[in-house]
Every structure is written in C-alpha cells, then in structure tokens.
Amino acid sequence: MSSKKIRRIRSLSVDVVERLTKNNLITCKDVLSRSDLELLKLLGFGIFTIHNLRQQCSLACVPVCTTGLELLTKRKQGTGQFFQTSLHGLDHVLHGGIPMGTVTEIAGPSGCGKTQFCTMLSVQATLPGNRGGLEGKVLYMDTESAFSAERLVEIAQHKFPDLYNSEEDLCRMAENVLVDNHQTCASLIKKLESLEEEVITHRIRLVIVDSIASLVRKEFSSSAGSNLVQRTNFLSRQAALLKYIAEVFCIPVIVTNQITTRFGRQATEQDEEETTEISDGYVTVALGNTWSHNVNTRLILQYLDGEKRQVLVAKSPVAPFTAFNYTIQRDGIVQDEEGAGLYAGTDPGVQQINVRTSLPFYNT
C-alpha cells in the first residue's frame, strides 16, 4: 500500500501534489521515508502542512477495513466478481471463474499449455461483458519471449468466429493486448512498481506475468546463503505489488510458474521455510512454500495419456481439490466433458505433477 501514488490522494491540494512531483516524491513511501526537516527543505511548506501531508499519506497506506456482511452483499449484488475462463466445469467449481482482485497461479511442466491458457484468457478479457469478458485491455508481461501474436489471432478466430470475422475486428482485439518483454528481475520489478499508473492510463482489466519463475531461477541461486535471502525478498516484493494492484483495482492477476524435482529433503530447489520428507523423487511446483502462500488460487496443469492433459484446482478459498481433463485445439484450451471430479489432493505446495517428454503440436 505504501507504493500508492501521491496524486491519487484526493484530499491533497493541487499545489502540494505539484511540488511533491517536482521534487521526485511520487509515492506515499517517498514521503513517509523522509524526515520532517528533509520535507521542509525540499517543499518549502510550514510544519503544519508537512504534518498534514504525513497524516494523509499514512491514512492512504492503511488497508480499508470491511465486514463479512459487506463482502457477502457485494458478492450478491454484482456479477463482476469473477472472470470466466470459458471452461464451464472449472468456472462452476470456482463459483463463477477466476476471482477478481486476487492472484491466480497457473503452474505445470513445459508444453502443458500454460502460455496457451494465458493467451486464451487474453482474448477472453477483451470481450464485452455479455460474452463473459472484461471489456478492457490486457497487460501481458512476457519473461520467456513465448507470447505469439499469431496464436492470439488464431484463438480469437476459431473461438469467437461471430465476433472476429474480419481483419479489422482482429486488429482491434490485438491492439487491446499490450505485451511487455522483460529479461531481468530489475526490469520486471521496476515495471511492477509503476504498474498502478499504467492500469489507470490504459484501462487495464487483466494482468498476466508469464512466467514468474523464469527470471528468478536464472538470477538467484536456490542454494543456502545470501542469494536465497535476496531471492525470497524479491519474490515477496513481487507478490506484494501484484496483490496490491489486484485488490485496489479489483482486477484478476494471473501468473505462470514452472516445476522442480525434489528428492526427500534434498531437492533441486529447497523450500525457504520448510521441507517435506518423501523417500522417492517427485515433480512439484517451483519457488517453494513461501511463494505458494502468496497466491490465492493455484491451478496445476499436468499430462495424461495421449493428447489429453489435466487441470487441477490445487488451491482455492472456495473450491475443493478438483480435476478436469482438457486438450489444446485451434480455439485454445478445450475441456473434456469426461474425467471431471474430485481428486485425491495434498498440500498444494508439494502436489506431485505428471510430466512427459513427447509434446504435441501446440507446445508452449
């Protein structure tokens, strides 16, 4: 909350906001991290104005308290509390789709359809409300250079042929998907810190980070030592910024995650807080338990026999541990009506994942 922009505090006068901006004091944190003497020298205001400025910034950082009844009433009054995935079984078990104002993780092995899922949701978000869309733009942060504009257009053409039956319609849809490439952790965190302004300016209704693990695993070692501390701090900072954006603007934030192999207490990626003793090696979601506690909903994609794959609702505040089979077609992720049902789950932080080496045509 301390990253809230000063200019969004309506109780401050235009003169105060302009003078703060000229002195590069952009967020509440910038003001609250400086002493009264520093603010007096920089701004030239009286001490009472400085104290009032501090008070307004402090109040802006305090989360708004609400009651369970208010949340329940808000849920019943509107239909915009969930973002439909177009997978009817999954939307049903999630009580309407991906919850707005939360962080949802899509994890799984390479080639299982994580980017395909995100691309399909990008198309879905640009749709009008009466078609299950969000009627806004999508910010797609790509850290693996995996996004395909051709695939975006292909999904739109085959999934919604009545809406996208001309080149003009497809161009208009594609313009609403803003793609941002990031190759370093510093670049990504800088983007997240300025994300609030971009969400307002471009009317962003869906934020996607594909993938959250790629840059972290390249730049930070998972071995013990200072690197592990920096890695944990970076992930916590990322999670805090994403949660803030999701909650303040009541939009869904979707991140993808990779997998890792563990062997009892000795693992390729050790957890920051705890380990689970299992005699045989197994594949599970990467980044450890600290990160798993930061996501509100976790969907795990895994392989089945042949072309079929499976999505597991591994963590959700409203849904039981459920599994749905799906295939990847030209119109994106297509749910199989067979094979759905409750699944024998475990701790979502150590859920075992089925993998395979041979991949079908759509393999991103």
Image (cartoon, rainbow, N blue to C red):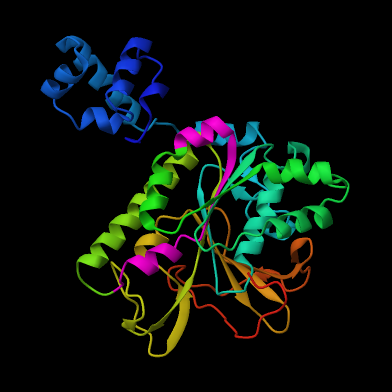
Give me the residue at 35% from left, 14% from top: 12
Residue 132 visible in the current orientation: no
The question of residue 111 being in magenta is answered with no
Residue 143 at x, y percent in the picture: 49, 59
Give me the residue at 67% from left, 45% from top: 125
Side of 362 where 163 appears, left or right? right
Residue 130 visible in the current orientation: yes
Give me the residue at 26% from left, 60% from top: 230
For the C terminus, the image quarter is bottom right
Side of 294 where 107 appears, left or right? right
For the N terminus, the image quarter is top left
Give me the residue at 58% from left, 34% from top: 202
Residue 351 at x, y percent in the picture: 48, 74
The question of residue 214 being in magenta is answered with yes
Vertical comparison of 151 with 19: above or below: below
Residue 240 at x, y percent in the picture: 37, 47
Marks counted in the figure total 0
Q: Quadrant of residue 58?
A: top left
Vertical comparison of 52 with 225: above or below: above
List the single residue furthest toward the left. Answer: 37
- Depth order, front residue of 78/229: 229
- Depth order, front residue of 63/148: 148
Residue 73 at x, y percent in the picture: 58, 32
From which residue to which does the magenta span run? 196-222
Q: Quadrant of residue 220?
A: bottom left
Q: Quadrant of residue 5?
A: top left
